[in-house]
Amino acid sequence: MSQDKTRALLIVEDDPALQKQIKWSLDQFESVTAGDREQALDQLRRHRPAVVTMDLGLPPDADGTTEGFRLLEQILAVEPDTKVIVLTGQNDQSNALKAVATGAYDFFAKPFEPALLNLTIERAFRVFELQAENRRLQAMHQPDALSGLITRDPQMLRVCRTIEKVAPSTATVMLLGESGTGKEVLARGLHQSSTRRNGKFIAINCAAIPENLLESELFGYERGAFTGATKTTVGKIELANGGTLMLDEIGDLPFPLQAKLLRFLQERTIERVGGRQEIPIDVRIVCATHQDLKALSKEGRFREDLYYRLAEIVVAIPPLRERPGDAALMAHAFARRFAQEQNRGSMTLGEGALRAIEAHPWPGNVRELENCIKRAVIMADGNQIGGDDIGLDLPEDGEGADDQLDLRTVRDNAERRAIISALGRANGNIVKAASLLGVSRPTLYDLMHRFSLK
């Protein structure tokens, strides 16, 4: 079979005899056909062809061009990169030029020469492939600011879109999420997507530094400010001037320091410990916590006025257990990375390992998963990581059963979970995921579209 058979071509023609003739003359391609606009759009969604040949005269306006031009616009709206070749009557040059102006790749007058049409279609496929390769190379040289985050979960994708939207602004952002959910990855992505990307990104964990040292770490100190202060030292806030400062575990900031931080946020100036000079600072603050700061403020353990200063934009990050399919997806990536770091060659995750990963609740979130896979890569005897290497227990049968009784909802939820699980196990490979689910690739694309999965 010719290699071109793997390239889908859509033929849109309402005359069955001519439709059959065109398909026969283009037999080196994997052709699908449509007789009207609705059929054409359905085939477009199912097969996503790189090239389309179409007649402008389609029912119910077979003698006019209304339906043809409407279809051309819809094809380019749904799949802008698709190459559309318009087939027109001999004396229809004005409509052919209009089609090209609308976005068609080329046009041919009927009756056409099969060899010339074949050559044009070949060139259209080649242009499509070159453009796709060019986009891929550009993406490699200009990585996404959030490229360190791996997810296919709709909740997490919304978080990413929120970060991208607020990044160019000057708003202070608060990231809420359990330990290990990727708060620092998102904070770095926020910095890289902002106008401050050329400045420094400085992170400080407010819970990891003793209270008596935290003030000097944040604000710096002058020489002689206290015993051992033999030289003037710049603090983290001043060091991040022109960039972004991440205050991790802000809920553990001591109460006396909360007042000093609030004053800085209001005045945008600091005084070093032992100093008297006000130093203007231009820095963006991103804070993160796993605690409920609103509840802490009601208990008098966190200043309410500081909370509202910090919470101009609040982003809640879902834990890993609430992101179906992400654990397996990330496990594949971690296995590749650690296998390379540990010189273990090419390592894969076996069925038992994947089942254990999907069943585990991951209380430590991504950090726990990362450590688990690293240990498994080191301990595995062969090139495949098995369930024993992962070291996790499978849940008992019936655990976590769905209490929903509405059959349509139960079926939809089950289908959605199965698709997400299959995509995670297949590491995003659509062909393999479709095989695991026992459906065709076009059916899987339709189901992904139905459940808004990307």
Image (cartoon, rainbow, N blue to C red):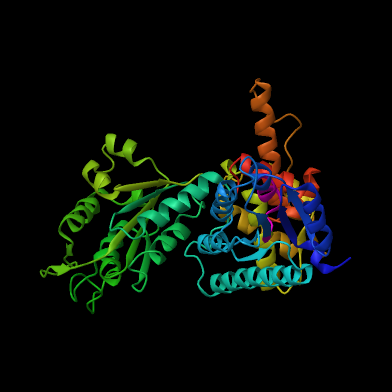
Residue at the image position 49 percent from the left and 61 percent from the top: 146
Classify residue 381 by image quadrant. Answer: bottom right
The residue range painted magenta reads 42-51
Residue 336 image position (x, y, % from top left): 69, 66
Classify residue 286 by image quadrant. Answer: bottom left
In the image, residue 45 lies in the stretch drawn in magenta: yes
Residue 211 or residue 301, whichever sits in front: 301
Q: Is residue 178 left or right of residue 407?
A: left
Q: Height in image: 420 above or below 233?
A: above
Q: Could you tell me if residue 357 is visible in this image?
A: no
Residue at the image position 66 percent from the left and 20 percent from the top: 405
Q: Height in image: 58 above or below 248?
A: above
Residue 427 image position (x, y, % from top left): 70, 56
Task: Look at the image and tell me in which quarter the N terminus lies.
Answer: bottom right
The total number of labels drawn is 0
In the image, residue 429 lies in the stretch drawn in magenta: no
Residue 314 or residue 42, whichever sits in front: 42
Residue 224 or residue 344, whichever sits in front: 344
Q: Residue furthest left?
A: 276
Q: Main secondary structure of the magenta part?
A: helix
Residue 447 or residue 278, whichever sits in front: 447
Residue 19 image position (x, y, % from top left): 77, 52
Q: Residue furthest right?
A: 1
Residue 82 image position (x, y, % from top left): 62, 60
Residue at the image position 37 percent from the left and 68 percent from the top: 201
Q: Is residue 14 left or right of residue 162?
A: right
Q: Is residue 366 left or right of residue 267?
A: right
Q: Residue furthest bottom?
A: 231
Q: Height in image: 192 above or below 408?
A: below
Q: Could you tell me if residue 226 is visible in this image?
A: yes
Q: Residue furthest front?
A: 91
